[in-house]
Image (tube, helix red, strand yellow):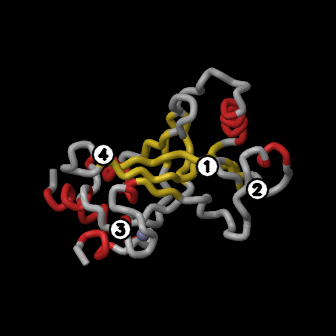
Amino acid sequence: MDPHLLRILNASRKCRCCGATFAELLSLSCDRPDICSEDLIVQDNSAIVAENGDILTEDFCRLGELYFIRAILTFPVANSAGAEFVLGTWANLPVEDFHTYLAIFDGQEEELPPKRPVWLANVIPLHEGKPAACTLVMRSEGQYPELDIAEPGHPLNELQNRGLTFEELLGMLHSYGHDIPSLVYDS
Ligand SMILES: [Zn+2]
């Protein structure tokens, strides 16, 4: 394992902005799709079926004709003996798939659908701009579905395959507003 990574993974230093350790920052999440206005408040999941119109809940979002669910995007960390950076993101999916997923969540549907094509609905730091076509992979009950970047030429596809370098990982955390010096150096 990269000795720098090992050292800060095991350190108890905390980020000055949020109080999280480096190990805790390996799991971050976006609370809404990028297109969703900050004005929408996050409601309990039950509101997605109970209310009409644009709505954001913990795991579902509906904006006009657009439908989203929460899904995780995992990047391995290179030379880390299996460490991963896990980002809670959002997937934009067709309305039929959205309803299938709601039924699974609600316990009405037990059979998991096969892998489905979706769009990543959050811009990922380091590779901003180009939206990524993904495959949504269902996982067992109680786990968020996972996103595989499906486009062979997309920069995020390469990143998912080769893993983040230590510097890229720090860059990613910095982009999400965390204070890298307080995590990396003893004060
Ligand atoms: Zn922080």
Pick the front one: 45 or 18: 18
The first of marks 3 and 4 along the sequence is 3
Say which of marks 3 and 1 sits in front: 3
| Label 1 element class | strand
> What's the CA distance linking mark 4 and mark 2?
34 Å
Horizontal side of 51 relative to 74 (left or right) equals right
Which amino acid, by three-letter code, is at mark 2? Ile
- The residue tagged 2 is 55
How far apart are the two marked residues, 4 and 1, measured between alpha carbons? 22 Å
Quadrant of res 156: bottom left
> Residue tagged by mark 4?
161
| Label 3: which secondary element | loop
- Please give the label number shown on residue 183: none
Q: Secondary structure at mark 2?
A: strand
Q: Which mark is residue 92?
A: 1
Q: Amino acid at mark 4?
A: Asn
Real-space CA distance between mark 1 and mark 2, rounded to the nearest whole angstrom: 14 Å
Residue 39 screen position, x and y as percent: 72, 70
- Above or below, comparing residue 183 to residue 70 in the picture: below
